[in-house]
Image (tube, rainbow, N blue to C red):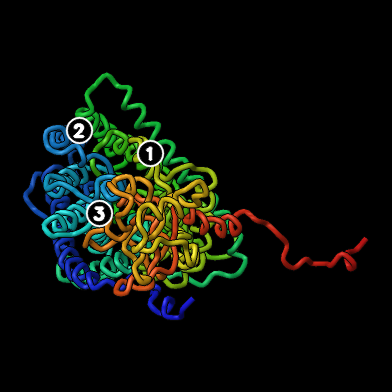
Amino acid sequence: MNNHLYDSRRDFDGSARLLMIGALAAVVGALSTLTADLLLHAIRFFTNLFFFQTLSTTFISPAANTLGAWVIAVPVAGGLVIGLIARYGAEQIRGHGIPEAIEAILFKNSTMSPKVALLKPLASGIAIGSGGPFGAEGPIIMTGGAVGSLLAQHFHLSGAERKTLLVAGAVAGMTAVFGTPIAALLLAVELLLFELRPRSLAPVAVACAVAGFLRPLLIESGPLFPLHTAVLPPSALVSCLIGGVLCGALAWLLSTALYRVEDGFHKLPLHWMWWPALGGLAVGIGGYLQPRALGVGYDVIADLLNNHLAAGVIASLLIVKAVIWLLALGSGTSGGVLAPLLMLGAGLGALVGPYLPGGEPAVWPLVFMAATLGGMMRAPVMAVVFAFELTHDVNALLPVLATATVAYGFTVITMHRSILTEKIARRGHHIYREYGVDPMERHSVAEVMTPAPASIDARQTIAEVLDSHFGADQRHRAFPVTRDGALLGMLDRAAIANAREGAVLAGDLFGVNLPIFALADETCRALATRLAVHQLERLPVVDDAASRRLIGIVSRSDLIKPALSLHAEELTRQTVRPIWSPKQRPR
């Protein structure tokens, strides 16, 4: 093959539209940061209103309330309001946000409504402000995604470009809430983008960077949970293995229990509008028994990471938090999963850390926190970087990596779907989350085409063509027609049947419109798309668009050839270098 066919191929798509999408992503990042700040202020406002009957956005923990038994009524009231908003506003506000964002990306052409952008933060502010044991990250991921989607809908963009801006808004919001731009970018890669291409990765990274730089202007800067632990000895690897299994088991237990609770609510003889109020009743009772289980609980996470709580307090807090979180989230209210998972994972680490060999107990709350998150969400790399950005504790990176990897492997083996994709599967959509380079992207048209194909000269008459190409020995369904080597189009028996006289020349059957063709350096994926769009079975391959010199032909059946190499790579098992040769093998 000519070298210039390879010289024109690129590692990545280098479309200049990347610049425009990147500029829009920067705007989305700024808007999502403002939205995140508004959500945090809304949570504080409703917390003060519900628990302290004051109009303020000053942070105060709902655990400091003096309502006594009346505290039980507060989450119930919040649940009633959320049910009304969901029924008469937008049902999409129900849930913890990330599954809804994924569903919009994969099955709704990355479009969200203005109602979601407005009502989701309002409902989440009410849910968390009235004591809901949730985090703000899920709602802001969905709200930020809605901001990106709405902006994208005002421009002439493709579905893939809208997806990029939706994800940019989602993870920029997460960056603003937690101050973790790199972890947010990895969340996009592992959970939301469903691809790893410059066209999406670069704009999303821009949005995260913009949110990261703007965050100190609106929200307190620095790590959310600053921590410094000692370097662990090699023997701690055993503890990482044990911890990974425990965190994976916790993730399995929580995910399984959540959907059992959700199934239970579906069996109730009540309209779903009333379910959040029932979930709120459970939250209220739990908050009365253990006030620190109410709300987001960042202060509790900080105490767990710094070992400021006694074992008995931790155990009771975790039990109450887990129960009310499962009941409230299963009821269909609005709230996130990250903060509760952080608390439950850190609590488990604080309880078992003193009994693990090879290291100080102080590191295990952080390790278990990240591993539980990575196992539950099937995003271990994000979880590792998330733990580092939350604490800036570099010494914990290695044990977090080992433990999160084990937890991830545990849940991959034991769970069909994650807590995020299970909800989508229950709506009839299965999501396959493994990434891999499409074999049709790795192979060019030149590698699968038939070179020097049989062709028809434009100066032949239809009678001659029928005799030479469409007779009893016809080898192909259609043939390219050329004039002096340049392609005019494809000719099949149906096209010939429209010719009125046998004396008509083959070249006369084609008008002035350019024929559809393929280039040798195009990917098989691009070719497959063209065949599908034009509903064709085969295409001629030309040297270049200007000369249209015919060099080959490619059919749909040729496109299965790249799958052969994938089949061999995935399924053919062989010993390349045996430990012993047949003569050396011991007897």
- Residue farthest to the front? 503
Residue at x-position 53% and y-position 62% = 402
Rendered residue at 87%/64% (across/down): 582
Residue 252 in the figure: left or right of residue 214: right
Residue 279 located left or right of residue 228: left
Point 38% across, 77% down: residue: 8
Residue at the image point whose x is 20% and y is 33% from the top? 76
Whether 204 is drawn above or below 572: the answer is below
C-alpha separation, residue under disc 2 versus residue under disc 3 = 25 Å
Query: In the structure shown, which secondary structural element does the residue marked by tag 1 occupy?
Result: helix
| Quadrant of residue 41 within the rendered picture | bottom left
Helix, strand or loop at disc 3? helix
Q: Which residue is mark 3?
A: 141
N-terminal of the two: label 2 or label 3? 2
- Residue furthest left in the image: 55
Task: Kindly identify the amino acid type of the residue bearing the numbered disc 1.
Answer: Ala
Instruction: Please state the horizontal and vertical placement of residue 259, each as a whole percent of the image.
Output: 38, 35
Residue that carries the numbered disc 1 in the rendered image: 425
First-in-chain label (2 vs 1): 2
**Viewer-nearest residue: 194 or 85:** 194
Amino acid carrying label 3: it is: Ile
Residue 217, how many percent across, how many down?
A: 15, 71
**Dots 1 and 3: beta carbons under 8 Å?**
no
In this rendering, would 409 be left or right of 123?
right
Q: Amino acid at mark 2?
A: Val
